[in-house]
Image (tube, grey):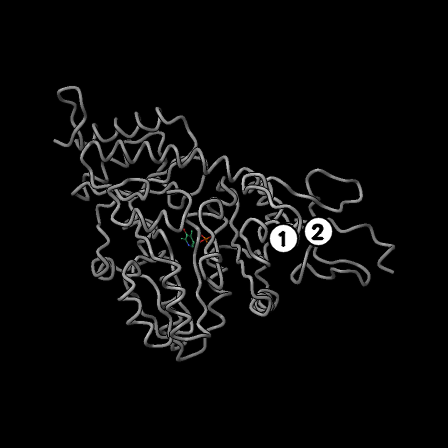
Amino acid sequence: MAERFPPSPAPTSPRNEKRYALDTEVVSTENNDQYSASSAPLYQTATFKGMGEYDYTRSGNPTRTYLERHMAKIMNASRALAVTTGMGSLDVITRMLKPGDHVVTGDDLYGGSNRLLNYLRTTNNVVVHHVDTTNVETVKSALAEKPAMVLLESPTNPLIKIAPLKEISEAAHAANSNCVVVVDNTMMSPMLQNPLDLGADIVYESATKYLSGHHDLMAGIIAVNDSKLAEQLYFYINSTGCGLAPFDCWLLMRGVKTLAVRIEKQQRNSQLVAEMLESYGFSVNYPGLKSHPQYDLHWSQARGAGAVLSFETGSVELSERIIEQTRLWGISVSFGCVNSLISMPCKMSHASIDPETRKARALPEDLIRLCVGIENPNDLLDDLTLALMKAGAVVYSDGTWRRP
Ligand SMILES: *Cc1c(COP(=O)(O)O)cnc(C)c1O
């Protein structure tokens, strides 16, 4: 009977064949389309007739499968699952938690993740420990609670702190063999870091950021190697209906093919911006700079420094003036887009964390975050320097720019 149906486009991301370098794999796709379409077809349908492989898009859709297999390949996972947003990924993952379970996580967490954990803490009796994940000893003392889950980010955003992923994963599994180690890899993307290879059980990314790259869709990708874990997560996705819609799967597939070139350029631009700000005398957080206190640790687990950096100006008013003066750098939350963005996390992306908590976690109110795009680097450097000058943050004297 199945023979009567045209071939499904769902993949063939060849896991068992020769593996190429990641920048090759990211553009190499195959499908079984009956007309050999170069771009896999979009199955914009809710239902499927007959008794074939697919019946209802909430449960499965060929375009979603195609994307998921491709993502699994580039994330070094045996299975990837596509959901509606990055936060949707964490929602699915935290459905594994039961009342009374402990979660150990960072103190410079993405604002939305912080908010979701707070909700689980206040309504579901989940005990959440926010600790400094740069310090293994601090993490180890929290692991004495035998947490059901450890949730890590590295680098963190916006303070760009590095967590030793391998060491913490090992310690977490030693403290509780059932502990699920989860890494939010949004800041690095699979081009630069593969937490599953470092001992994590689950990796997820907001595909709204680098994976798609153009700020034209929202999505989340969850990746695992354990098939039982994959089935459990798929169960939550199918039950709650948060699987990514076919059109967004198709758009994400289109966007992810340029991941390698985008990251390469964004990273090169970031290095130049970071070096420039440091030369002006600002305290810059970027793991591409030797001055980063965890430079060696970062490079032991990642292949690049990424394209998000932050710096302090010493005054909230000065920071506000700077971000208002830029023209090329758009004032916007989020990152991972081909356009360069500037923001003040305490006023924008992290405003959902109350001021007391921000203070307790040493999140400077004057912090400026830069998310670097693919523009010409000279234009980016000029625009930023001009904004710094107009705001009064730098002056030109003796042939160099410096803080007054
Ligand atoms: C943006 C982001 C998320 C949430 O992703 P959405 O797609 O916006 O839901 C989670 N973690 C990090 C680190 C992010 O930057």
Q: Say which of 181 and 34 sits in front.
A: 181
Name the secondary structure under disc 2. Answer: loop
Discs 2, 1 touching: Cβ within 8 Å: yes
Q: Is residue 183 left or right of residue 240?
A: left
Q: Quadrant of residue 353?
A: bottom left
Q: Position of residue 96 (x, y in %)?
A: 49, 72
Q: Is residue 255 left or right of residue 326?
A: right
Name the secondary structure under disc 1. Answer: helix
Q: Identify the residue at image location x=26%, y=45%.
A: 292
The residue beneath circle 2 is 10
Q: Is residue 109 left or right of residue 357?
A: right
Q: Say which of 82 and 262 sits in front.
A: 262
Task: Identify the amino acid type marked 2.
Answer: Ala
* Cα–Cα span, label 2 and label 1: 8 Å
| Of pointers 2 and 1, the one earlier in the residue sequence | 2
Q: Is residue 376 above or below residue 36?
A: above
Q: Identify the residue at image location x=42%, y=74%.
A: 148
Q: Is residue 62 left or right of residue 397?
A: right
Q: Identify the residue at image location x=23%, y=40%.
A: 320
